[in-house]
Amino acid sequence: MTQENPRKRVAVVGGGITGLTAAYRLSAGGHDVTLFEQAGRLGGSIRTERSGGWLIEGGPNSLLEGEAGLSTLIDQLGLAAEVQAGGAAAKNRFIVRGGRLQALPLSPPALLTTKLFSAGMKFRLFAEILQKARKREGDVSLEQLILDHFGREAVDYGLNPFVGGVYAGDPGLLSARHSFPKLWEIEQTKGSIIRGQMAAAKERKAAGKPRPRIISFRTGLGALPDALAARLPAGSIRLGARVEHLERTQEWTVTWKNADGGLERGNFDEVVLAAPAGALGALRFGAGGDCSLAVLREVVLPPVASLFLGFKREQVRHPLDGFGALIPALERRKELGILFSSSLFEGRAPAGHVALTVMAGGMRQPELARLGQAELWEAVRGDLRDLLGVEGEPVFSRFNAWPSAIPQYNLGYEKFLGAIAACENANPGLHIGGNVRDGIAVPSCISAGFRLAAAVSGGPSV
Ligand SMILES: Cc1cc2nc3c(=O)[nH]c(=O)nc-3n(C[C@H](O)[C@H](O)[C@H](O)COP(=O)(O)OP(=O)(O)OC[C@H]3O[C@@H](n4cnc5c(N)ncnc54)[C@H](O)[C@@H]3O)c2cc1C
């Protein structure tokens, strides 16, 4: 520690991947960190379980490489040898159309022959390359953006299932600027989305960077929170500690409710908030630390249910030669998507068995995410039979419900980003980040953790 960069006492609120990354970096930088997590476990949305020969991901299932924070973290934690790349078949993705799984075309020749899109749609895809850069007056929905470039069919059988799989969201409500900022930027600078994607791939090649892979770890995504927690000093993690009140005088006084319901207080130089939107909206600020994040309670977070199902290989007719299947709303099925978990990564099911993960609910059918495990299985079993030839009862299953799963960066989201920035500006020493602000994917949250730590230390982010 130096005079310009003194050792600070830092409270980190939220033990998901954002808070854990920030706490790890701060601690590695010599700061005195206390991590508060209201639940009895760390990891937040990352929830990995092992049982018998099954490896279950109850929340996120895979990570897309490409962000510097993710690779830096993997290196720093010594996890490189544990990384598992998606299996050979995982590059195949299916979209359901007309009640059948159709492979997503991955090359121009495959596009010409696919049954997923009509001839008119294929023509529009090729013609899109001629679009000129477009300056819009303001933000538009993701649906409008794709409609303008590719037409209705691309929205119904491309965007809709894709957005259901990533955001569990409604493309008519999601903001193009906030939910897919890279697409928004490509439109402004290059015009054509296809040309923009091709240019990005060319740049990547020229820079000698490999194509980003889909990855996990041999022991599942839980490897990340486990390794981060193991790097924090003994006594720095408080589980079952729900932070309720923040007050700024000469220093920050943080009040939390402990696992027995009692209130405790502690003093800190700086505070990092890495909790979800609803929790930030419920925080109370006092004295000089006045600011309101109450507006964040209006952020929409639809519920999602994840149902992990194990079958004997012979119970499933489909070869499961892919990442999984995404299901457009127009197909009127009960699932947002079905992951072929045991094809995606090795070691997810015992020999002679396969594992599927069904995601249901989201903005499309929130009521399905509120069903119990048995009811959800009854609701989806007919679709699994029709689409994948699944017969009989699962030999293993696990159910995870997420009542407020993923924040929707809907049109008007700048209202929330503005409130977060205003709160930080009014409170020196307060830093806010995570999926409410920095992007919803786990790698984006890791980058957020690096950013938050750097904001406390005053150093570079990654
Ligand atoms: C079902 C599902 C599937 C997903 N699939 C993928 C995927 O495949 N790939 C991908 O990249 N991303 C995926 N995501 C998104 C990604 O998992 C999350 O956006 C990311 O993990 C969020 O991390 P976080 O640390 O910002 O927040 P969280 O993980 O929500 O952690 C915040 C923590 O703060 C705690 N907390 C809240 N209030 C308080 C308080 N007052 N005091 C103390 N602690 C508090 C919470 O208990 C929680 O542990 C998925 C998400 C879900 C729900």
Image: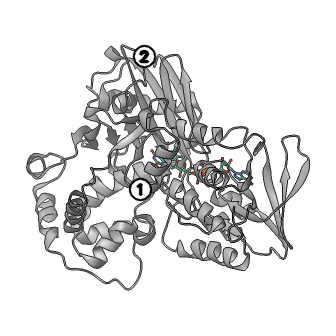
Q: Is residue 441 above or below residue 52?
A: below
Is label 1 in contact with label 2 (beta carbons under 8 Å)? Answer: no
In percent of width and height, residue 379 lies at 47, 33
Query: Which residue is drawn at the image coordinates 29% and 66% (left, top)?
Result: 146
- The residue that label 1 is drawn on is 67
Three-letter amino acid code of the residue under disc 1:
Glu
Alpha-carbon span between mark 1 and mark 2: 33 Å
Image quadrant of residue 5? bottom right
Between marks 1 and 2 in the image, the one whose residue lies nearer the viewer: 1
Three-letter amino acid code of the residue under disc 2:
Pro
- The residue that label 2 is drawn on is 350
Query: Which residue is drawn at the image coordinates 23% and 63% (left, top)?
Result: 203
On-image quarter of the N terminus: bottom right
In percent of width and height, residue 28 lies at 63, 51
Q: Nearer the viewer, residue 172 or 297?
A: 297
Q: Is residue 345 above or below residue 401?
A: above
Image quadrant of residue 244? bottom right
Q: Which residue is farthest bottom? A: 137
Query: Which residue is drawn at the image coordinates 33% and 67% (left, top)?
Result: 183
